Image (spheres, helix red, strand yellow):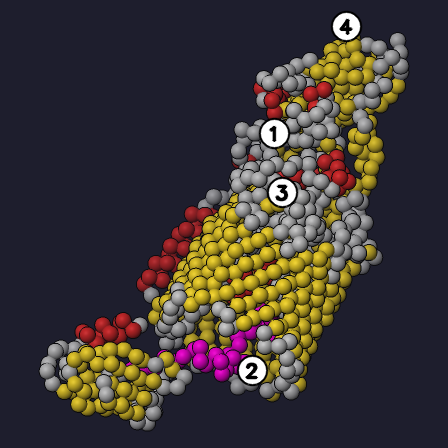
Amino acid sequence: MKNNLKFLALFLSTSLVFTSCSNDDAPVNEEEVITTVIVTLTNGGNTITLTSKDLDGDGPNAPEVTVSGDLIAGTTYTGSTRFLNELEDPAEEITDEVEEEGAEHQVFYQLLSSLGTVTYTDTDVDGRPIGLSFTLTTGSTAGTGNLTVTLRHEPNKTASGVASGDITNAGGSTDAQVTFPIQVVTD
Amino acid sequence: MRTIQLLFFFLFSTVIWSQYSIDGIITDENGLPLKGAHVHIANKTTSTLPNGAFLLEKIPTGKQRLYISFIGYQPIDTVIVVSQNLTLNYQMVLDITKLNEIALFQLRKNSSVSVVEEQIAKATIEQYSNQTLGDALKEVAGVSILKTGSTIVKPVINGLHSSRIPIINNNVRMEDQQWGTEHAPNFDVNSAGKITVIKGASALQYGGDAIGGLVLIESEVVKKDTLFGRTIANFASNGRGGSISSSIHKGNRLGWSWNVVGTLKHLGDRETPDYMLSNTGNREQNFSGSTQYNAENYSIGGMYSFYNAQIGILKAAHIGNVTDLYNAITTQQPFVVDPFTYSIDNPKQEVQHHLGKVNFKKWLSESATLDMQYAFQFNNRLEYDVRRNSENKKASLDLQLATHTLLVDYKKTFDHWQLKTGANLGYQNNFANPQTGVRPLIPSYQKIDLGTYAIGTYNIDNSMVLEGGLRYDFSTIEATKYYLKSRWEERGYDDEFSHFIVGEEGNQWLTKPKFDYHNLTGNLGFRKQFHHELEWYSNVSLASRNPNPSELFSDGLHHSTGQVELGDLRLEREQSFKFSNTLKKDWKKTNLSVTPFINRIANFIYLQPIGFETTIRGAFPVWEFKQTEALLTGIDVNFNWDVTQAFSYKSNFAYVNGENLTENQPLIDMPPVTWNQKLVYSNPKWYDFTASLQSELVFRQTRFPDYNFETNIVVNNELEPVIVDISSSPAGYHLLHLYGEMTFNLGKNNKITTALFIQNLTNTAYRDYLNRQRFYADEMGRNIQLQIKYNF
């Protein structure tokens, strides 16, 4: 009987320990969120900025997509892509992290070949592209379509076609995927 | 017991060289004299007189054999040392095993008299020692399983699952976060001595919300003075691992008895006939121990169990966005297949469940008992995800659920009727750890439950029993949750729930939603026996289930399933009205039981795919908790036939038809028609050889609602609209399972049983409608399992 009382006391005391971690009203500091993707295309003094911004993360609001101007046919643009977390103040530059872990990341660009072609201009430690910098050469004719930018985590960088920018065999998981409507005009 | 007795005699004996007389009184378990008990000491015998007394003279000095017996009681067989005149008063102990054989019918302890209780035998539990509780429960007609991959298995009773099926573990209602479809019961099947399934809410003493049914688990209870143990080792080819479980049981009718069970499980990746299911290994380390002290008119006991599991989630099921989902459905191939490994990577689950209880039972009189119980449970669920920063090994979800419950039950038997009544008080606290860096799907909350019930059973005559019960439950829940302002608005909470807002933090509202529920539930039924061969059970029950925290508060991306899940604060309690009947008919060599049921559920809560939401990571499918008027009808059929002495045949069939009355279409996720048949051969002469061939036939679910949606995905570098078919059911399938076992006796109480269990004998590739990962990969292929069981 005495033993059982001890037992009971033990249970009650352990339960107090477990419940004493009271409700913390602090909001979750969301980590690893990408809110913003910015693609910058430069040709001489002409800069076109494509921005996709989703400040409510996984919330219901769709990303706000803005494209600052039209692309010009038959032109080679120097491109760079940035990933930001703008929920932080100042905004967290996730691009650096992607670059540091370049071997585990790759950015893919998908658009109709009549609108343009993308060539990678950066490499990771293994000499394979990361895709944060690239050149975009627009086609010779005018047209409209979409540019889809995808950041893949842990893609299979040695799979067929991946190094040249084909996402088909890349695998991995998607950290960011945004689509920009683009228009190519003749000069 | 015997040793204590021996000690007793040694202590009171001194050595004198002479002859002595021994007298005494033999009494029964109630202390009343036993007339005619046989007493045998040395070469002298006698029988007790009506007052229980005996006298034996001229017993020689020294060690003598003592033997006392009486029919229905455990005989006393020991050695005493005679060195003086002795008085031996002895109280005989009832032999429970012998009484069981005679009085099994009267002794059966039912939770509900008007509903057939289906029991899973210890042998079946042992057969599934390497699997889960859900796999063992599937043996019952009308129970199917809801899976996430191969290792997360939940029972479905007559089409209903999760919060609708409370699991009662040794009289403690498990609070292990059963709200999620990918949350399996945190229970080691090896620690069960007996599992009972009650379809429906008729067992009111356990709660009024068991809309689907109840699973009652009891540890092995041994009321004999004995000590025995068992070790089961399993080796499985699929998963290339196994488990080992050991248990020791000390039984005693009076005094201390105890049980200890420990289990270790270690399995690697499972495989289908064609490919590896990468990252599907699992581990378990479980322990449970209980002790009980039995006195003449009271008993006191305590129990502690610990369940610790690490479960890998199929890598291919970790989808990035709706494009990945579309590709998986269209190609029917997993997008990652790695070579076999034992290691478990992210995504994975780590769950721990502690359960401790103390209970006290008092026999107030011969016909009345009072039970009190306090139980504490602590459940910690960690879900790990593939994170962008692979250095980050933090869990994405960390929920800590603590539950205290206090029960008081009183039972009284009168001449023709029995009364059971009681009350419960519960306090629950969930803590959603904000350190994960991911907004939790389930918020922190506190809940208080209060309930009381009364059940009456009335024996009209030997052939008919009436049963009726009423229960009242009060429940209040208060959560602390941050809502994204955009979500708060999208859900349309502005008007109705603005009073819940207590603060603001950037783009989020801090809210404290609070809900109170008052539920009145009841049931009425009877059991009628026509002759001895035909029995009729009939029951109507009214059950109420409050929406669970997942249904109320979920809002956001469920990373492990790659889908956005949205709860709704407007959800109301679910109310079910179930009418079920069972007809059981026994013939000489066959028996048949047929259970048709109809379950009308008002405000039935279900998860419905409603489309997609676009985020920076692409579009994700959105599933929303919705409420509808539902009607479930169905039938379970059991048929057994002892064909010859060696051969027997068992068959069970289950059909459930779920209709969404509001939308006038089938309900989502209803189990398809299943038909299980088993042919058993046994030959006791040949080392207790038993072999069985089981056929599991699962038809295609033809009744499913169309919740397909259209989305744009990138095809050939350009966006293209496609239909994502998340509704269609996979094809039906037929599996064969082969089982064989033999037992070798190694001595008095030692035996070894070896068993071979081949599941999916023909290595069939199939998918199951009730598997949440059916979009991503096939089910497990053939599994050859070797089991060695050592009883000692």
Q: Position of residue A15 (x, y in %)?
A: 44, 51
Q: Is residue B199 left or right of residue B358?
A: right
Numbered range of the magenta stretch: B90-119
Q: Are marks 1 and 3 on the same chain?
A: yes
Front of the two marks 1 and 3: 3
For disc 3, the marked residue is: B277
Q: CA distance from mark 1 to mark 2?
A: 65 Å
- Which disc, if any, is residue A45? 4
> Residue at the spot x=65%, y=46% of the render?
B272
10 Å crowding of disc 4: few (<14), some (14-19), many (20+): few
- Which disc, if any, is residue B417? 2
10 Å crowding of disc 2: few (<14), some (14-19), many (20+): some
Q: Nearer the viewer, residue B405 or B683?
A: B683
Q: Are marks 3 and 4 on the same chain?
A: no
Q: Is residue B787 above or below residue B298?
A: above
Q: Is residue B117 magenta?
A: yes
Query: Looking at the rendering, in which quadrant would you find the N terminus of chain A?
Result: bottom left
Q: Are marks 1 and 2 on the same chain?
A: yes
Earlier in the chain: of badge 1 and badge 3, it is 3
Confirm or deny contact between disc 4 and disc 1 (CB under 8 A): no
Q: Check disc 2 and report its element: helix, strand or loop.
A: strand
Q: CA distance from mark 3 to mark 4?
A: 53 Å
